[in-house]
Image (tube, rainbow, N blue to C red):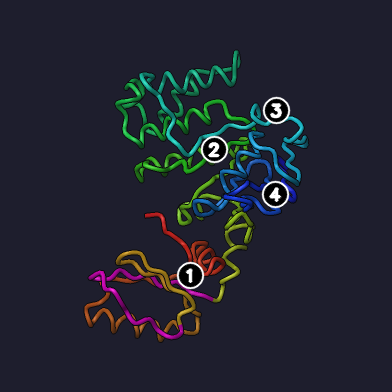
Amino acid sequence: MILEVEGLTKRFAGRGKSVKVANDNLTFSIKEGEIFGLLGQNGAGKTTLVNQILGLITPDSGTINLLGESIIQSPARARSICSVQPQSQVPLGLLTPKQAVTLMGKMRAGKKFNPKRVDMLFEELNMDEWANVEGEKLSGGARRLTAFCMAVVAPGKLVILDEPTNDVDPVRRRYLWQVIRKLTNDGTSVILVTHNVVEAEKAVDRVAILHKGRLLTQGTPSEVKSKVRDQMRLEMNLLKDFDEIDMPTWTISSNRKGARIIMTIDQEQVSSTIDWVKDRVEKGFVMDYSLSPSTIEDVYIELTSGRWEWDE
């Protein structure tokens, strides 16, 4: 195992005498060469967990072992082994992407740094047009990709990516996932920290859902989705943003954001559901709809009683 976390708990003092439990008895492990998705809303405890893995915060209880040695006892070692892309944008100033990535590569790899690695990353991510543009003139997506390259130009055995695709266009997102998979093929392990459930489901080998500091479930995407294996997902787009729309009584759960509605139903109710949604189409309420097997997003909704903000 690359990383083994057992019984990890971290509390912070709140207002007055209150205490906030940021991480509550977390236990999981990460294998060599796998992409491990850590999913959760803002405030779920993801950043606190990452900071403990990096040795920046000491847990109140529990253990964290990286390549067989305690992070708590050797926090500096953890930071030398891990490569990180933070959620916040990296300030580049007047540095160009090529200068920033080259500098990071030299800092991490020293004499072993291969400058051809920078050119290869820029080519794989189709970033050549920005390679020599000053950082302050770059778009958010270009700066995000630059930060990603800085994290993987000389990767450690564990790479932590916090929302790596924010602001990145769809085409280069696909390139980015290809680069990440190449990393794992070489034995590097990746922690993907995100709230974009749809994207993560396609990219990860295993996934853990973190909610209010606790791990609700973990496993392969198939194992996690098996918790709602007898359920189907109906997604609808309304023609107008109606205040109310009558939901069928057999709906297991439903969530709405603007004109988009997602319903979870039992497989036995598929026929009734199709009749119901066709009727709403004819009456001018629904513009289009799709019916598909349940996703990890549906599992999250189910486990957290429907309190979920989708990533658009």
Query: Relative to the observer, which residue lies in front, 9 or 168?
Result: 9
Give the alpha-carbon distance from disc 4 to disc 1, as whole Å. 35 Å
**Element type at mark 1:** strand
When the figure is inspected, residue 99 is found, relative to residue 188, above or below; the finding is: above
Tell which tag, 3 or 4, sits nearer the viewer. 4
From mark 2 to mark 4, how far is it between C-alphas?
A: 33 Å
Horizontal arrangement in the rendering, residue 303 relative to residue 26 (left or right): left
Residue ID for mark 3: 77
The answer to whether residue 247 is magenta is: yes
Residue drawn 62% across the image and 40% down it:
189
Q: Nearer the viewer, mark 2 or mark 1?
A: 1
Of callouts 2 and 1, the N-terminal one:
2
Q: Which residues are magenta?
A: 231-250
Mark 4 and mark 1 in contact? Answer it, CB < 8 Å: no
Q: Where is residue 5 drawn, in percent x and y?
A: 72, 46
Secondary element under disc 4, as helix, strand or loop, is: strand
Which residue is pictured at 49% across the width and 18% down the height?
A: 103
Which residue carries the number 4 mark? 9
Badge 2: residue crowd in 10 Å (few <14, some 14–19, many ≥20): few
Residues at marks 3 and 1, CA–CA distance in whole angstroms: 44 Å
Q: For the residues labelled 2 and 4, say whether their Cβ atoms are less than 8 Å apart.
A: no
User: Is 267 rendered above or below residue 162?
Assistant: below
Q: Which residue is mark 1?
A: 293
Residue type of the residue flagged with mark 4: Thr
Q: Estimate the x, y position of residue 276 in percent, counting from the top left.
A: 34, 84
| Residue found 66% across the figure and 48% down from its top | 11
Disc 3 crowd, CA 10 A, few/some/many (<14, 14-19, 20+): some
| Residue 77 higher or lower than 287, as above or below | above
Image mark for residue 182: 2
52 in magenta: no
* Identity, as a three-letter code, of the amino acid under mark 2: Lys
User: Cα distance, mark 3 to mark 2?
Assistant: 25 Å
